[in-house]
């Protein structure tokens, strides 16, 4: 089978011919049809995380394909089922977090595409208990990005306990944000899109935004306060300086959640915490429970990512386009031509 290997950081991926993996009784062999290209893949390729990525590695954690071999202990998946694999490859399954369905907090989880072979390959094996079935009415190409981008923003919004008619602002209308707008709208919220470019307004409104704030022209906090203040702000941007002004736009009891891994701190005045009881938090991916919910919710409400599909052979060019910010929403590799 063909795989794209990251042999060492800061070098293009190298195509190699590997044996198709053998599975044990508890595993599933997936024929990968599509694999989304996530910003995290770029961090792996560019060596940003080289203290915890061990090279060589095969990236890819937005995997959608078909179960082609199923271990005999895996009774809940059949050969031929549409299935996928997310960021969480496996976890200990017995710690308090795992028992609570919160595998991303498990201290002993394995990560698809980092500690285990990921989806930039024609086949991958995975532990049956972590392989997730894709609802029949979801197309495989469109479901791939739901395994990271989708579950990340869906889980973040769920953890913020959105009530219908709350004002929910989404900052950053890219791969994550364009899905967050759709989920927030389907959850019954009044939705604000916040972007540094007015070019995103048309798309944001098509995806359900009731209001649009262009931060290059106006102060987002002031605009949010004019709307009564945001009950929820979900920010998908990577720069703390872009997130900082939004704190002032929260309504009393407002919650701000970050899903973009900015390194610099953001400041919150203790006075605001006390008098407005605001909450500042964050969220990363989601466990199996929230992933199943993400897929079902997306299928039920017809929520789809906007994708551009490229042949697997073009992976290095696609990564380069993500690096340059040329992929506006989500890129997906097509393995089966
Ligand atoms: Zn990802
Ligand atoms: Zn655990």
Image: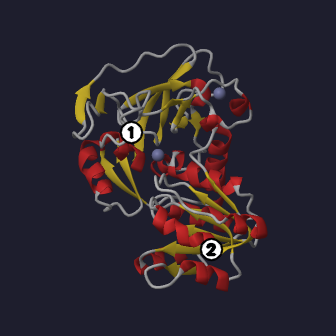
Which residue matches tag 2? 248
> Up-down: is 109 above or below 321?
above
Could you tell me if residue 336 is visible in this image?
no
- Residue 150 visible, this orientation: yes
Q: Residue drawn 24% across and 28% down? A: 16
Rate crowding at label 2 as few (under 14), some (14 to 19) or many (20 or more) other CA atoms within 10 Å.
Answer: some
Comparing 240 with 3, the one in front is 240
Give how far across and how far down residue 136 sits, in percent. Answer: 59, 45
Residue at image point 42% right, 61% down? 329
Ligand 2 is found in the corner quadrant, namely top right
Q: Would you place residue 98 above or below residue 149 in this image? A: above
**Secondary element at image label 2:** helix
Left or right of 293? Residue 174 is left
Left or right: residue 253 compared with residue 144: right
Q: Is mark 1 within 8 Å of ligand 1?
A: no
- Mark 1 secondary-structure assignment: loop
Mark 2 to mark 1: distance in Å?
32 Å
Tell which tag, 2 or 1, sits nearer the viewer. 2
**Of callouts 2 and 1, the N-terminal one:** 1
Number of labelled discs? 2
Q: Is residue 302 left or right of residue 1?
A: right
Question: Can you tell me whether the CB of the residue at mark 2 lies under 8 Å from the nearest atom of ligand 1?
Answer: no
Q: Which residue is mark 1?
A: 49
Q: Residue at x 62, y 61 (%)?
A: 183
Q: Residue 297 at what x, y percent from top left? A: 66, 53
């Amino acid at each position: 089978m063909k795989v794209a290997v990251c042999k060492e950081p800061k070098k293009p991926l190298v195509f190699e011919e590997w044996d198709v993996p053998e599975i044990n009784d508890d595993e599933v062999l997936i024929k990968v049809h599509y694999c989304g290209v996530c910003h995290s893949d770029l961090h792996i390729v560019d060596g940003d995380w080289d203290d915890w990525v061990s090279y060589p590695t095969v990236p890819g954690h937005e995997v959608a394909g078909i179960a082609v071999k199923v271990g005999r202990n895996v009774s809940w998946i059949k050969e031929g089922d549409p299935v996928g694999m997310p960021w969480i490859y496996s976890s200990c399954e017995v710690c308090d977090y795992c028992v609570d369905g919160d595998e991303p907090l498990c201290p002993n989880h394995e990560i698809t595409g980092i500690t285990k072979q990921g989806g930039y390959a024609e086949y991958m094996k995975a532990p049956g208990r972590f392989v997730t079935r894709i609802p029949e009415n979801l197309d495989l190409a469109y479901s791939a990005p739901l395994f990271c981008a989708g579950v990340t923003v869906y889980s973040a919004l769920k953890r913020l306990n959105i009530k219908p008619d709350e004002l929910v602002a989404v900052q950053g209308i890219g791969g994550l944000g364009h899905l967050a707008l759709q989920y927030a709208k389907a959850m019954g919220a009044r939705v604000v899109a916040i972007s540094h470019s007015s070019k995103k307004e048309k798309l944001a409104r098509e995806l359900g935004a009731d209001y649009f704030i262009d931060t290059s022209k106006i102060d987002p906090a002031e605009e949010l306060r004019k709307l009564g203040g945001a009950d929820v702000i979900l920010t998908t941007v990577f720069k703390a300086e872009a997130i900082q002004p939004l704190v002032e736009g929260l309504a009393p009891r407002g919650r701000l959640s970050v899903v973009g891994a900015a390194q610099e701190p953001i400041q919150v005045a203790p006075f605001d915490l006390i008098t407005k009881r605001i909450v500042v938090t964050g969220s990363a991916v989601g466990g199996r429970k929230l992933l199943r919910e993400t897929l079902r919710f997306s299928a039920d409400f017809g929520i789809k990512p906007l994708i551009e599909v490229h042949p697997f052979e073009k992976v290095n060019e696609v990564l380069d386009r993500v690096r340059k910010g040329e992929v506006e929403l989500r890129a997906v590799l097509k393995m089966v031509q």
